[in-house]
Structures are given as C-alpha cells and as structure tokens.
Image (cartoon, grey):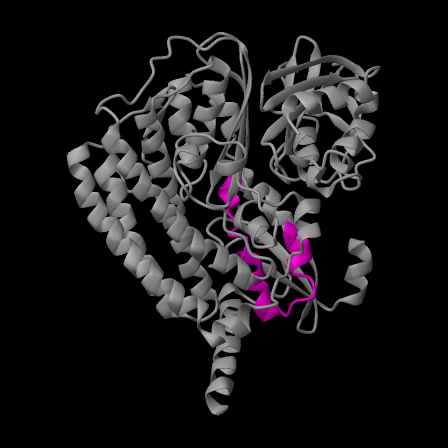
C-alpha cells in the first residue's frame, strides 16, 4: 500500500519531530501530490519514558505522582483512572465529599484543556485573537486550581480511598466568583467562534470522520462525540460524583473540525454546570470527610477508567498483595485517536492538514509516554513548521478578504 | 441488556472454548478462553455485541505470557476482559489487526515489550522503539 502510494506522489512533507503544531516530538510524513495529501505516515518512539515499568518499582501511593506526570495537560485523568482501578481491587467506596472534590478537579481540568485547544486551533487558522482570548480566560481556571490544591498543574489531589485536601466550605463563595467570570467569558468566546463566517468556511467539511470511521478505529472523546458516537465514560460507567449531578453528553453529527470545536466549546458549559452543582453538594457534606482508610490492597486484577478531556483513559493493574503493582498498563485516549489521521488528512489540502491533525487534540506524551532525538541525516525536502503554519493562516486571510469583498 | 445476560450469551455460545468465566461486578466480566479461539470470539464481540476495543494488557507470570484483551460495551458500561494464556516457550497468538484496525498498534507494542508474536499481523514494524533498543531485547520480560 505504502509503496504504491510512493510511486504516484512527488513530494514528502515531514511535520516534526519538532513543530509548533506539536507539543512533543513526533514525525508525520505527508505524502503529497501537488497541494493534495495522499497518504500519512506516523513515526514515534523518540523518547520512551518507560512509565509502566517504572510504576512496578513504586508503592501505590507513589504511583499517583508518577501517573500524574504521564501528561502535563490532563494530569489528573491518570490518577483518576488509577484510583478507580485500585478502589475496584480493594472494594472501597469513597465518601461523597471526596467524590465531589474529585469531579471538581476533573471538570476544571476539562475546561482548561478545552480552552487550550480552542486557542491552539485559532492560532493554526490565523485567528490569533481567539488564541489570546482562550488562553487569557484559561488563567482564572488555573487560579482556581491553585486555590484548591496549591498547584496550577499536577495537583497531587488523589489517593486511594479519597483525596488529599479538602475544599473548605468558606472558600466556596470566592471560587464561585472566579467560576462566574470563567462562565461569562466562555459564553462570549463560544459566540465569537461559532458565529464567525470565516471559521465556518475554514472548518466545515474539513477533516471529516464518519460514525463508521470512529467505530472502526475505536476513537474516543470529543472526536467520537462530534461524529455522532455518544460515548462518555462519565455516563456509561459512572464514577465519582457524576451520577449525583445533572449534565448531558454533548454530541454533533457532521464529524468535521467545526463539529469537534462545537462539542468542546459546549462541553465547557456542561463542565461549569457540573462544578457549580458539586459546590452545592459539598455544602451538604460534613467538612473533613474526604477519605476512606484503606489498610491493604489484596492480590487481584482491576481495570479503571476515567473520561479525560480527550477521551477515555484506561488503567489495568495486577497486584500480588504487596505494596507495589505487579503489572500496570496505561492506555491514554490519543493512542486510539491518532490513527484516525489516516482517514481525516487524506484528500485534504496541505493548508488544511494542520488543523485536521490538530482536531483530535493529539497528545503525544499520552501516546508513547516517552523524549527526543533528531535525525541529522535526513535529506528530504523540508517545508518547515513556520511555512506550514503560514499556509494555514494565509488560506484564512484569503477567505476573509473574499468575504469582505462580497456584498 | 445486563452484564449477567452478556455472560450467559458468551457462556452458551462458546461453552467448549471457555476455561473460566465470572462477573467480578455488574460492570466487569472476565473470560478465559483458549488462544486458538481468540479470533472467532473477538469477531463475535465486535459484530454481535457491538463491542469497542479498549486495549490489551500483556503480562508475564508463572503460567507463561498472559494477555487481557479489554472490550467495552458502552451502552451498559461493561468491560469484557478476554484472557488468554500463551506458553513461555512459544508465545504466539493470531493477530486481531485483520479484524479491527484498532488493535494494530497495541499488538505491535506488546511484541516490542514482551516478544509475543502476533501471527498474520499486517504490519509488524516497530512502533515505539525504532532505533532505540537492541534486537531481541524485550524490556518487560522477566528473565
């Protein structure tokens, strides 16, 4: 298949291992015929961190800090899934107050991650105002994290049986104020992005994934929900406080970049609503009841999952009665989402390829849990990151200019 | 549909191939099957039960190499863990990548980390260790 394609194409455009589109090293080779992408090849393994192996040498308490570092952006999803997994093995039920606190952390993380994506997507399309806004309004969310956990990232809130820190009831009104600011700014951002005719022109019909594609690749999260596959672990396999609050799973049908943006933006409002309800729930629970004491972990196997901003995070742990995991398998959502590039990028123009790649919010450290190397020997023609970014932005400018000319 | 019904369906359809089956909770089903029957059981899970493939976890134990294939029935939030045991002297099993592309990467990863051989895999190239690891070295094997 690959050889056949190589015969018919003239140019190979590498994106990566270093590229502003990507937060981590990864190499995409776009096989192009003129402006059109014919095939995509994906190369990874530049920096394997060996976290699964490392986990076997840590105590269960230490593993939380380790898996929190699998990914910097969705740093709480992995402790969340790991906690669910360990509590399944130990057969522990955690107090409601801890459930609310866990859900607050999980949803705040979804808000900051989605805002980060909206900003990056705006940047790729040449909308630097969207980029500045989204990242500006992400700041108060990080402030909330600091108020709750003392950290802006990597919150160290989870432990087997509950959470490490309480949210004192007298702090809630101040947090609500910050959350209200986030809510009003989010509403403004949603209006600005979803009503913009140039963004419509630039993202509708681009990088389409059909329902069948999603099922075939086993894709997850907003990428699946934007194609009409309504899967969400928070509802399907309920955990933490999600069964205790009212919320709905946001879906769209078209499967293009616009739908994915729409799903993420509307999920922001759902997350804010969940947090508000959790704050109300906290007020009803006694302060300080944040954990169930777990004395030992029996031998056994367990599976735990949590809905990260990018989709389902899955952990599998085998225990042998000691204080260490015997085997720990981690599967992050991008591992399932990235292979869909084969479908979403092929047939697109080069200037649309960047946003089609970015649309599933790929997170490579999730995928390979790995660092970096650079191939000095490569002699392939390189259209570098700046050029590609420029192509994407120039196309938006051209559409905008054309729209302005039309009456 | 409930977890108990799914268990019953699998039990009645694959009775000869199952060595162990049990519901750990309403949402967690464990099934141990013979490695030879893996492709047909997987086909049944994909086609009849409309399962989504989550991932697979390999591990090494006294029994040899074990693989848990995790499937999700999202409408009822059930995880079906299909378990196979492969002898240490001959860790070979049929690849599922020809049935579902979703299994492609994880089989390559398990091959690199444990040296398990997936027969008839369409593309057994290295996924995560290109240029970094020695040939024939499997980092998660317990030697």
Membership of A247 in magenta stretch: no
Q: Position of residue A311 (x, y in %)?
A: 52, 43
Please indicate whether residue A233 sits to the left or right of residue A29 in the image.
left
Q: Position of residue A310 (x, y in %)?
A: 50, 46
* Above or below B80: residue B104: below
Please indicate whether residue A5 sits to the left or right of residue A211 in the image.
right
Q: Position of residue A301 (x, y in %)?
A: 56, 16
Quarter of the figure that contains the N terminus of chain A? bottom right
Viewer-closest of A402 and A25: A402
Span of residues in magenta: A340-366
Residue under the image location 60 percent in, 37 percent down = B132
Furthest-left residue in view? Answer: A170
Residue under the image location 81 percent in, 29 percent down = B39
Q: From the image, give the main secondary structure of the stretch colored magenta.
A: helix
Q: Quadrant of residue B26?
A: top right
Viewer-closest of A368 and A157: A157
């Amino acid at each position: 298949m690959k050889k056949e394609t190589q015969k018919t194409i003239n140019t190979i455009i590498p994106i990566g291992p270093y590229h502003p589109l990507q937060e981590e090293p990864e190499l995409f080779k776009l096989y192009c015929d003129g402006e059109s992408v014919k095939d995509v090849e994906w190369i990874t393994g530049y920096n394997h961190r060996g976290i699964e192996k490392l986990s076997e040498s840590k105590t269960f308490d230490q593993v939380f800090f380790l898996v929190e570092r699998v990914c910097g952006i969705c740093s709480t999803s992995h402790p969340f899934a790991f906690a669910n997994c360990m509590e399944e093995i130990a057969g522990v039920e955690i107090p409601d107050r801890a459930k609310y606190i866990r859900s607050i952390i999980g949803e705040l993380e979804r808000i900051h991650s989605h805002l980060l994506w909206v900003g990056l997507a705006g940047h790729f399309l040449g909308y630097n105002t969207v980029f500045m806004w989204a990242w500006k309004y992400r700041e108060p969310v990080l402030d909330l994290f600091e108020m709750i956990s003392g950290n802006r990232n990597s919150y160290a809130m989870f432990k087997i049986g509950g959470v490490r820190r309480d949210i004192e009831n007298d702090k809630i009104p101040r947090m609500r104020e910050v959350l209200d600011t986030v809510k009003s700014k989010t509403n403004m951002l949603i209006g600005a992005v979803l009503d913009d005719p140039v963004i419509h022109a630039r993202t509708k019909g681009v990088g389409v994934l059909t329902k069948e594609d999603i099922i075939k690749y086993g894709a997850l999260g907003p990428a699946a929900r934007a194609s009409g596959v309504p899967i969400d672990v928070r509802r399907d396999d309920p955990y933490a406080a999600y069964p205790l609050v009212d919320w709905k799973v946001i879906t769209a049908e078209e499967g293009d970049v616009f739908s994915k943006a729409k799903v993420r933006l509307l999920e922001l409002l759902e997350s804010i609503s969940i947090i508000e309800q959790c704050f109300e729930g906290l007020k009803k629970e006694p302060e300080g009841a944040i954990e169930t004491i777990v004395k030992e972990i029996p031998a056994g196997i367990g599976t735990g999952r949590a809905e990260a901003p990018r989709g389902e995070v899955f952990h599998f742990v085998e225990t042998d009665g000691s204080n260490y995991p015997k085997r720990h398998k981690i599967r992050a959502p991008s591992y399932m989402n990235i292979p869909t590039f084969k479908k979403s990028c092929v047939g697109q123009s080069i200037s649309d390829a960047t946003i089609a790649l970015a649309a599933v919010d790929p997170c490579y450290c999730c995928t390979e849990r790995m660092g970096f190397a650079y191939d000095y020997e490569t002699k392939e023609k390189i259209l570098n990151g700046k050029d590609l970014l420029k192509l994407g932005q120039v196309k938006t400018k051209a559409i905008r200019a054309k729209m302005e000319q039309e009456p | 549909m409930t977890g108990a019904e799914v268990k019953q369906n699998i039990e009645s359809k694959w009775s000869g191939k199952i060595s162990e089956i049990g519901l750990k909770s309403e949402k967690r089903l464990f099934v141990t099957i013979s490695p030879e029957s893996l492709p047909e059981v997987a086909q049944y899970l994909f086609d009849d039960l409309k399962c989504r493939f989550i991932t697979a976890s390999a591990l090494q134990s006294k029994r040899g190499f074990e693989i848990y294939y995790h499937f999700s029935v999202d409408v009822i939030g059930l995880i079906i863990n299909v378990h196979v045991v492969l002898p240490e002297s001959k860790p070979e099993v049929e690849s599922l990548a020809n049935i579902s592309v979703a299994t492609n990467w994880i089989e390559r990863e398990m091959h690199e980390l444990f040296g398990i051989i997936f027969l008839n895999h369409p593309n057994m190239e290295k996924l995560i260790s290109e240029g970094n690891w020695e040939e024939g070295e499997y980092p998660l094997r317990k030697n």
